[in-house]
Image: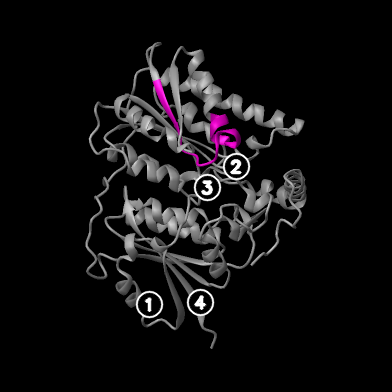
Amino acid sequence: MTIKMTLVLNTLESGDCSEQIKALFADKNEEIEIINTADLKIMHCMGCNNCWLKTPGVCSIKDDYEIILKKMVAAENFWVVADTKFGFIDYRGKRVLDRIVPMLNMYIEIRDGWERHQLRYHPLNFGFIYKGNGNRELLEEWSMRVARNLAGRSLGVISLDQNGSCENTAEMPSDSAAAPIKTAAPAADEHVIIINGSPRVKKNSNTNKIVHAFAEGLEKAGITHKLYSLSNHAEWDEAREAFMTNDNIIIAVPLFVECLPSLLLEFLSTLPTERKQPAKLSFILHGGFDEGHQLRLGEKFLQSLPAQLGCTSGGVLVKGGSFLLRNRENSYIKKMTDKILASYTTMGQSFARNGSFSSSEAKKFTGFEKNPKIGILLFNLIFKRIVKKNFERIAQEWGCSEPLDAKPY
């Protein structure tokens, strides 16, 4: 009988609950390895795409995560143990998930009817063990999405607090998402705080391009704005103060492993629990794939955040298809992405008129939820090869010397 290898990453501080975690796997016919990540140096994913387009399968961040990647290549089952914050996985747990990207490669395929990146190695089953008051429905859907992205199956979601004696220290999330409020159009002299929640540096940030296009629409309506970028840690103190003292805030963020990037989750966890004045909090959520349904779990989580941060909700603007915004040197791609950015300028004007993202314009902005059958057929017959060649061209421009589907471990 083949013994399955199961890798468990315990991201709880100081390796809390290690014995309890071991007990969960005591009767399993599996080889179990538990790694306490508190003992390791692991940084946030920067979203640089080097592991896809420059050094395939090798992360450009030189920290202890390479140890984990090498073990993951040998694993069949993969569990993350983490605390919860805002009813979701906390930033420490999400940080080890965001760094899993080298397990996939840049090439795209249609799998289970969804646009997916191809596996670099083999399918990986995924499960989540949590401490605290998590939103179980949200966590189960997220776990399922992560597993499917890895072509595996969900191993389920387990609460340590319901399976043992770990002390419960997390806050209880709101039972319901904050409903979008009916807001009057902003006054001409209104000021909006915009926070770029992407970990990618501004120069290469698709979110930064989207924010500037959106802000152009605000400016046409006479609304000023101040932008803070969380990729620059030096801006965090000012961004926190602006969040607490302004009454109209927009956070723009890319989808990272089915939800928010760990960097933004860390920033949100540092915010004071009491606001200095009421505020409306809105979000712009974007992703590389075109399909709207790829972003719906992230949207669901964002809808729950305003109430937990002492704000009312201005809604979530959802849009896919942003990957190529970074690579605009090609004239055809530039023409196509100019249209994308112009649409965000239009949505900036819409936000100025409506005061939120609850308008019919914002709802239609997402586009199609799923690829139609004819679109999937055309992709498999024609566009898959074109997209592949385009990625290989970009990789060559970036100085890549290895096949994009290389297996370095």
What residue type is disc 3 on? Gln
Q: Amino acid at mark 2?
A: Asp
What's under tag 1, amino acid-wise?
Answer: Phe
| Gap between marks 2 and 3 measured at Cα | 8 Å
Residue 201 lies, with reference to residue 141, above or below; the image says above
Residue underneath mark 3: 294
Relative placement, left or right, of 178 versus 394 is left
What label sits on residue 25 in the rendered view? Answer: 1
Q: Amino acid at mark 4?
A: Met
Q: Rounded to the nearest whole Å, what is the CA distance between mark 3 and mark 1?
A: 32 Å
Q: Residue at x 47, y 74 (%)?
A: 6
| CB under 8 Å between discs 3 and 4 | no
Disc 2: which residue: 290
Q: Position of residue 210 (x, y in %)?
A: 55, 30
Are discs 1 and 4 less than 8 Å apart at CB? no
Relative to 391, does residue 145 appear above or below in the rendering? below
Tell which residue pokes out farthest to the bottom in this image: 1
> How far, Cα to Cα, is label 3 from label 4?
30 Å
Q: Earlier in the sequence, mark 1 or mark 2?
A: 1
Label 4 sits on residue: 5
